[in-house]
Amino acid sequence: MAKKQSFLIDIWYYSKALLHDRATRRRLLSYQLIIVLTLMILGNWPLSAWVEQTAPRFIVWWGGTLFLTSWMLLLALYDASRVRRELLDEEDSP
C-alpha cells in the first residue's frame, strides 16, 4: 500500500510552482493589493460601525488586514529579489 503524501507537502510544491513564474507572482500581488485596499476601504467607511461594535470583531478584521498586507509586502520583496537575481544571471551568462 502506497503512503499518502502529506497535504503540507502538496501546498509546498504548489507554492514553489506558483512563485516560479514572474507573471503569476505579479498577478497574485495585484489581486492581494485589490483585496487589501477593499478591506481597508470597507473597514474605514461603510462597515466601520459594524467593525468597531465589538473588540474581537475589530481585532479579527484589522488583524486579517494586517496579515494580508504583511504577506503582500513579503511577496513583493521576494519578487524584487527574484527579479534582481534573474537580471544578474542574465548579465553573467555569455
Image: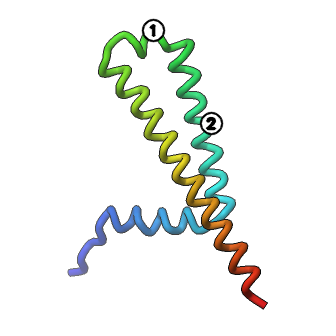
**Residue at (55% x, 12% y) in the render:** 46
Which residue is tagged 1? 49
Q: Secondary structure at mark 2?
A: helix
The image quadrant that residue 26 belongs to is: bottom right
Q: Kindly give the residue lying farthest to the right in the view shown.
A: 94
Q: 59 and 31: which one is in front?
A: 59
Residue 71 in the image: above or below residue 34: below
Q: Secondary structure at mark 1?
A: helix
State left or right for residue 90 relative to residue 68. Answer: right
State left or right for residue 5 relative to residue 12. Answer: left
State left or right for residue 86 relative to residue 69. Answer: right
Three-letter code for the amino acid on which mark 1 is drawn: Ala
**Residue at (58% x, 56% y) in the render:** 77
> Where's residue 10, x and y in %?
39, 66
**Residue at (65% x, 45% y) in the render:** 30
Three-letter code for the amino acid on which mark 2 is drawn: Ile
